[in-house]
Amino acid sequence: MKKNSKKIWNYALMLLITVLTLGPFLITLFMSLKSSGQGIYDGLLPTDPTLANFFTAFKKANLGTYFLNTIIVTAIAIPLNLLFCSLAAYPLARMDFKGRSVVLALIISTMMVPFQLYMAPLFQLSGQLGLQNTHIGLIIMQVSTAFGIFLMRQAYLRIPKELEESAYLDGANKFKVWYMVALPLVKPTLVTLAIFTFMGTWGDYLWPLLNTTESNMYTLSIGLAQLSQNFDGSNLKLISAASILTTIPTLLIFIWLQKYFISGATDGAVKG
Amino acid sequence: MNKEPVALAQVKAKTIQKEKRRLNAKYFTPWLFLLPSIVILGVFLIIPILEAFKWSFLDYKIIADSGEFVGIENFKEIFKDKDFWMSLLNTILFLLIVLPLNVFLPMILAVLVNQKIKGVATFRILYYLPVITPMVVAALIWKMLYSQNGIISALLVKIGIFDSPTNLLVQSSTALIGVAMITVWKGLGYYMIIYLAGLQSIPKDVYESASIDGASTFQKFKSITFPMLAPSVTLVSVMTIIAGMKVFEEIALTTGGGPSGATTTLVMYIYNKFMDLDVSIASAAGLILLILSIGASLLQMKMTSKNEDDLRA
């Protein structure tokens, strides 16, 4: 009897927390489905559910362009970051060379530096290099990251050396050993890094905000922020629809790669 | 007779070649691996950081004919600026609101979803949803919830905190609490996972023997779970402080630092200076932010390692 009531309390508490974490999304979803006839604060549920706001978001708010830009930058950033980080981390984990500790210390210490310290010089540099309002300019902070190198190095350090050593005895060179032996063994960490890169690029706000002035180069974050400049009336329905659409890709990837998100959360704890 | 020296020479040549290749592999190959990252990080990270250090000692405004060396004048100006001290105070207040909530709420979540009962896996996922939400979306959703006619304002009237519908974000006395709640909401699931890892490293027989001794659930939490989670508490606190010092989107997209500076944190201060093209002041303030965040994590590490020593003693 006592055990049962404890169970009920547990579920009640867990459901209450669910209302807190899921509720805001549901309210936003309901808002986005409200028809033009229904006032924005006129009841919680849509009385006459419609997808019109989603279509309007694409037509009037140019959401399609922002989606395309966001997809382009994410699709460039992820493979490049995986390649460059997994390359750079390998000698830092496995080779003995002069300057290794200096490079490693430099990489780890830059992880602590807040972006706001160097955003102004970066902004000027991006202008000088002609990277403003370009896709490449949007992702320069994501194509090779100190955090990614650190993460990959930890992964290489965890795999046993013997496999690589026997490959060397077979006459393979370092690139071949890296590509054929080490890389397949750190696949889970590659997925984790891909997720981090995706989250970092898809939702990035401050750098795209500084580096884009033309609306045809806006990413979803910037487009959404611009849309929210007018934060009332029927525009709230559009903002809600655009917010839902912006979140859906991250949600799908989360559902697909759930266990990597969870294991990655503890890996990322060092990031700070 | 002649054969042997030739063979010897061949062997020698081969050894030299081999040695050359070995040296190549030793000195050259590592840098080949590192090359792309070194170029990218060098140009877009290291150089800007060094520039920022330099700019903080110049009088620079991103325009020609500026950039005179002024020594520590920028820092003097910042320390004389009332807005700076206010932004520092707001950052500290923000951390004071977020830190206890970030330490305790996710711990409760983790204990709940660590039970062996049906459905906890689903709850874990539901609690993680805010973490994967893009920050811009989270900020806008909450801005909507906070609006005067929105649900939060209605709830606050219902439980008697306000007499009439009020938007927390437009009152200077409550705006910082409002944005802090967005941060807490977004981090709940993440810190829950950190605690979950900590909980799962506690050996089960400790609980079993406590149960045999007749300990209640609360007693078990107080005397076993909580002390054993000390390392996770440290980790969550450090991460909260470091992330909290850099809080930006939640504020920029909801209050923009207002009303009348009530939510202007250190990062918002830097951002505002940058927007005024006062980049030397922005860089100098950024340097202060860097020093503070390094200092905070060092202090925290020291404090908690002392705590752990006390526990062991």
Image: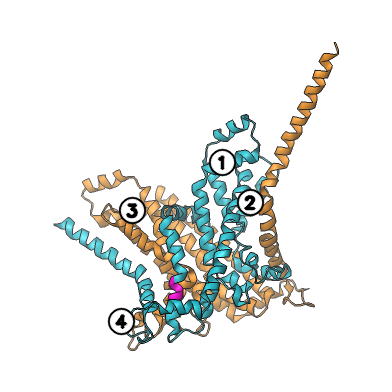
Chain colours: A cyan, B orange
Mark 1 chain? A
Contact between labelled residues 3 and 4, with CB atoms less than 8 Å apart: no
Residue B69 locus on image (x, y percent): 77, 72
- SS at badge 4: loop
Contact between labelled residues 2 and 1, with CB atoms less than 8 Å apart: no
For disc 4, the marked residue is A47
Locate residue A234 relative to residue A143 in the image: left or right: left
The disc, 2 or 4, on the residue closer to the chain's N-terminal end is 4
For disc 3, the marked residue is B225
For disc 1, the marked residue is A182
For the stretch drawn in magenta, the main secondary structure is: helix
| Alpha carbons under labels 3 and 2: distance apart | 36 Å
The disc, 1 or 2, on the residue closer to the chain's N-terminal end is 2
The crowding category of the residue bearing disc 4, from other C-alpha atoms within 10 Å (few below 14, some 14 to 19, many at least 20), is some
Residue pictured at 66% horizontal, 50% vertical:
A103
Residue B99 locus on image (x, y percent): 44, 66
Residue A170 locus on image (x, y percent): 62, 30
| Alpha carbons under labels 1 and 4: distance apart | 57 Å
Contact between labelled residues 4 and 1, with CB atoms less than 8 Å apart: no
Q: Is residue A120 above or below residue A226?
A: above
The crowding category of the residue bearing disc 2, from other C-alpha atoms within 10 Å (few below 14, some 14 to 19, many at least 20), is few
Span colored in magenta: A240-244
- SS at badge 1: helix
- SS at badge 3: helix
Residue A98: quadrant of the picture: top right
